[in-house]
Amino acid sequence: MISKDQLINILITTALCITLLVGILHFFIIDMFKWFSYIPDAPKIVLVSIQWTNFFLSALITVYSLFLLYYKKQLMKKNKILLNAYFLFMFTWFLHLPVTILLPHTGNFDKSFVYEITGFTVIFILFLIPYILLLSNKQKPISKS
């Protein structure tokens, strides 16, 4: 049987690796799903704005995942700054849920909606469980980075 710390480590690593993969794949999502075919007459400024927004979102997700993976040991020791950074990342995944339900990107509750909501829920839970377990540990948080 695995220990509580091993479980926390496995779940954090899994959540961050999945998120890292999402971040990397997001760099290519515009071409993979031919986003611009839906707006063929859009002005160039709109197309460039979409590209920039997607690029920086992809970079943020990728770098944030790498950052937390790199400092995972300190996170496991309950470093307050890293716990807060982890919480913000987890909260971002949580926010995907109501936004996806209220404003599905395809406009429909179709198969892609089910995949998205399932994926976001799984990733959020993978973040949430270790966060709760970390907070329930008796070890006091450290404030040094």
Image (cartoon, grey):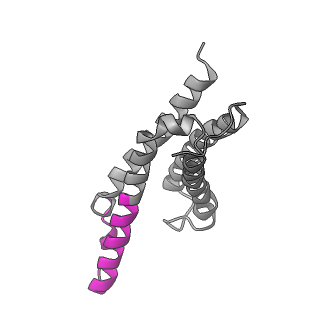
Q: How many marks can you see?
A: 0
Q: Position of residue 135 (x, y in %)?
A: 69, 39
Give the vertical position of 32 relative to 5 (above or below). Answer: below
| Boundaries of the magenta span | 33-59
Give the camera-side residue of 51 and 140: 140
Give the camera-side residue of 16 and 77: 77
Q: Main secondary structure of the magenta part?
A: helix
Asked if one can make out residue 39 in the rendered structure from this viewpoint, the answer is no
- At x 51%, y 38%, the residue is 74
Give the camera-side residue of 64 and 48: 64
User: Which residue is the extreme one toward the front?
Assistant: 144
Which of the 4 quarters of the picture holds residue 104? bottom right
- At x 40%, y 63%, the residue is 57
Q: Position of residue 122 (x, y in %)?
A: 57, 42
Answer with left or right where residue 16 lies relative to residue 84.
left
Asked if one can make out residue 74 in the rendered structure from this viewpoint, the answer is yes
- At x 30%, y 65%, the residue is 34
Q: Quadrant of the N terminus?
A: top right
- At x 38%, y 71%, the residue is 53
User: Which residue is the extreme one toward the top?
Assistant: 1
Give the camera-side residue of 95 and 81: 81
User: Residue 65: within the magenta?
Assistant: no
User: Residue 37: within the magenta?
Assistant: yes
Which of the 4 quarters of the picture holds residue 132? top right
Q: Position of residue 58 (x, y in %)?
A: 37, 59
